C-alpha cells in the first residue's frame, strides 16, 4: 500500500475540515481567532468579520501552523495576492498542498490542491460553502499554481474520480 506524503500545512488544513462561519450577522470566534493570530502584518488589513471572504485567512493560517515563512505576502486576505507568492509550479508538477488561485466573479479564491480529475481540481479551502471543505473547481478558472519558496515539492499530481466532491462555481 502506497501512502501519499502530505506537507504539514495540508495536514493542518484537513484537521480544520467542517469549521463553519457563524450564522447570520455573528462571526465565528474560530475564524476571527485565526485572523487575530496572523495579525495585520500577514493579512494586510484588519479582518473582523467572517462575512468578508476568508479563504486567504485559511491558507495563511495553515501555512503559519506549519512554520512556513510568509514574508513577501502583503495582503494574505486577498485570494489573488497568493498568485505571486512563493514559487510558480507547473500544472504537471502539482503536488498535494500546492496553493491554487482561481478567478471568480467579483474576485478570486485560494485553496490547497488535493487532487484532480480530467476537468476539475479538488481543493481543500476555507469559505467554500461558508466552511472549510473539499470541493471541485474547474481547471479553466485556475490562474496560478504556487509552492512555498525553499520548500521541496514532496509529491506528484493525484488523479481522483470525478464523483464525490461537490463542484463549486462561486466561493464568495
Image (cartoon, rainbow, N blue to C red):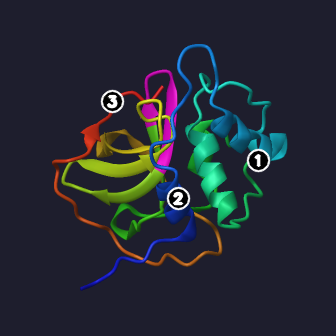
Residue that numbered label 3 is attached to? 169
Residue that numbered label 2 is attached to? 146
In the displayed structure image, the side of residue 156 where residue 61 appears, left or right: right
Q: Nearer the viewer, mark 1 or mark 2?
A: 1
Q: Position of residue 41 (x, y in %)?
A: 83, 45
Distance (Cα) linking label 1 and label 2? 20 Å
Q: Nearer the viewer, mark 2 or mark 3?
A: 3
Residue located 52% across and 51% down the image:
16
Distance (Cα) linking label 2 and label 3? 21 Å
**Residue lying at the far top of the rendered structure:** 25
Q: Position of residue 162 (x, y in %)?
A: 17, 50
Write the start and end of the magenta stretch as one range. Answer: 103-111
Residue 79 appears in the rendering: yes
The secondary element bearing badge 1 is classed as: helix
Prevailing secondary structure class for the magenta stretch in the rendered image: strand
- What crowding class fits label 3: few (fewer than 14 Cα within 10 Å), some (14-19), or many (20 or more)? some
Residue 74 in the magenta stretch? The answer is: no
**Residue lying at the far bottom of the rendered structure:** 1
- What crowding class fits label 2: few (fewer than 14 Cα within 10 Å), some (14-19), or many (20 or more)? many
Vertical arrangement, residue 6 with respect to residue 78, above or below: below
Q: Position of residue 53 (x, y in %)?
A: 58, 29
Residue that numbered label 1 is attached to? 38
- Mark toward the start of the polypeptide (2 vs 3): 2
The quarter of the picture where the N terminus appears is: bottom left
Q: Position of residue 81 (x, y in %)?
A: 63, 42
Q: Which mark is residue 167?
A: none
Distance (Cα) linking label 3 and label 1? 28 Å
Q: Nearer the viewer, residue 2 or 172?
A: 2
Vertical arrangement, residue 149 with respect to residue 27, above or below: below
Which image quadrant is residue 44 in?
top right
Which image quadrant is residue 91 in?
bottom left
The secondary element bearing badge 3 is classed as: loop
Amino acid at each position: 500500500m502506497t501512502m501519499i506524503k502530505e506537507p504539514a500545512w495540508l495536514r493542518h488544513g484537513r484537521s480544520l475540515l467542517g469549521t463553519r462561519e457563524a450564522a447570520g450577522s455573528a462571526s465565528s470566534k474560530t475564524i476571527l481567532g485565526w485572523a487575530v493570530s496572523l495579525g495585520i502584518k500577514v493579512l494586510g488589513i484588519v479582518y473582523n468579520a467572517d462575512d468578508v471572504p476568508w479563504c486567504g485567512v485559511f491558507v495563511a493560517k495553515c501555512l503559519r501552523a506549519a512554520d512556513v515563512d510568509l514574508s513577501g505576502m502583503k495582503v494574505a486576505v486577498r485570494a489573488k495576492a497568493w498568485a505571486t507568492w512563493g514559487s510558480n509550479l507547473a500544472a504537471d508538477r502539482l503536488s498535494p498542498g500546492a496553493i491554487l488561485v482561481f478567478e471568480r466573479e467579483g474576485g478570486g479564491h485560494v485553496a490547497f490542491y488535493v487532487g484532480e480529475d480530467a476537468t476539475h481540481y479538488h481543493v481543500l479551502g476555507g469559505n467554500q460553502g461558508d466552511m472549510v471543505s473539499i470541493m471541485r473547481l474547474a481547471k479553466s478558472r485556475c490562474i496560478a499554481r504556487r509552492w512555498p519558496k525553499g520548500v521541496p515539492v514532496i509529491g506528484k499530481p493525484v488523479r481522483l474520480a470525478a464523483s464525490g466532491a461537490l463542484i463549486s462555481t462561486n466561493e464568495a
